[in-house]
Amino acid sequence: MRIAVLKERREGENRVAATPDTVKGLVKSGAAIAVEKGAGAGAHFPDSAYEAAGATVGTKAQVLKGADAVFCVRRPDDETLSRLPSGAVLAGLLEPHGDAAFARACAAAGVNALALEFTPRITRAQSIDALSSQSNLAGYRAVVEAAQLYGRAFPMMMTAAGTIAAARCFVMGAGVAGLQAIATARRLGAIVTATDVRPAAKEQVASLGAKFVAVEDEEFKAAETAGGYAKEMSEQYRVKQAELVAQHLAKQDIVITTALIPGRPAPKLITGEMISGMKPGSVIIDIAAANGGNTALTRPDEIVEEGGVRIAGFTNLPGRLAADASQLLAKNLVNLLPLLRGEDGEAHVHWDDEIIKGMALTRDGQVVHPSFGS
Ligand code: NAD
């Protein structure tokens, strides 16, 4: 089986879908790996390291020739998509939600597109779940970015010259990214509180030593889907939550927002008015910036300042830890491989497997994902 690894073309995308480590394992398992020249440069994996691991390194046209599977971090551009061999699998973070045009383009190219975002949340698929592997790093990096922007220290410090109070950090959305943000802020010495609309989050927040802050009514008690994701909350709940959040925000120094609803714009949790009630010098890192943001003032990839409060909308926090993020994403793809080949080691997609069924956007020239109504 031949696997091609593309160089990412999106501006600022430093991750890569295979590392010299994963290449070594793939080659050992009998696969032939072709890596596009310079693919690992942004994550400090030189071409020579891929060659030493057993890959061939070449131009885009060379690596795509005869590929059975193409691994990428982000979806390829139109030109690259049109050059993928017909019948090949394309696997990566394809940003599939609601984008029927992209799914149709994959079908027209004859590519069998598998979107990592649609990995089912079942135990067996955990090692393939790239949203989790990347969100975890995003949560960590968000706190590091906050610490850098914040003009004060995180921990309480008792010195001969006086005492510095610990920073107060509020994490909104306690999923994978939020829990890592809580843990990281705690490690740095902040006093951490967190909120979420899923009742299961309460215990997880407490287990990390943070205090849970939420309106815990009947709607809250029922607010989790079978897939473990949040439901969109009613207008009535949002009003009650907003009141609580406004009072709490006024006392915070650092706010990390991570709230997402799959396939929907990110919920707006922080209004401009709430931001004007915050302390000058406080910092908001909006991890949901790529999905529209959790605050009214978030601008993608900008740091907006309003009344002394800075709101940072980094849209690719995992990409700011490119080597680690690549390593985890590449491992997610390695773990997918048994579902892409047969016992003889040759290309053979396990179309009947529920993980593949969940992830498949297209098959044999047709759009097959149920979210596109076919
Ligand atoms: P996500 O990235 O979709 O959303 C981030 C968080 O925002 C979630 O916790 C969500 O509940 C929260 N949120 C949404 N609307 C909100 C609002 N209005 N106010 C406050 N918070 C809001 O979620 P995620 O991090 O990918 O994961 C969600 C859950 O799924 C977590 O409990 C996670 O541990 C679990 N999970 C399970 C598996 C598995 O295989 N079983 C894999 C990964 C994650």
Image (cartoon, rainbow, N blue to C red):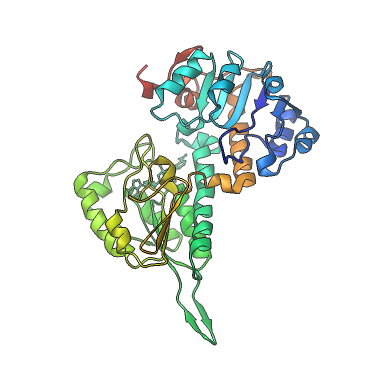
Does residue 245 appear in the picture of this structure? Answer: no
Tell me if 151 is positioned left or right of 4 in this view.
left
Question: Which of 314/70 is in front?
Answer: 314
Residue visible at 71% across and 41% down in the picture:
45
**Vertical arrangement, residue 140 with respect to residue 355, above or below:** below
- The quadrant of the image that shows the N terminus is top right
Quadrant of the image occupied by residue 97: top left
Picture coordinates of residue 146 (x, y %)? 49, 59
Picture coordinates of residue 215 (x, y %)? 26, 56
The quadrant of the picture showing ligand 1 is top left
Residue visible at 49% across and 39% down in the picture:
131
Tell me if 323 is positioned left or right of 229 in this view.
right
Picture coordinates of residue 159 (x, y %)? 54, 83
Picture coordinates of residue 156 (x, y %)? 49, 75
Tell me if 266 is positioned left or right of 105 in this view.
left
Tell me if 36 is positioned left or right of 102 in this view.
right
Quadrant of the image occupied by residue 54: top right
- The quadrant of the image that shows the C terminus is top left
Does residue 125 appear in the picture of this structure? Answer: yes
Residue visible at 78% across and 33% down in the picture:
51
Count of labels in the image: 0
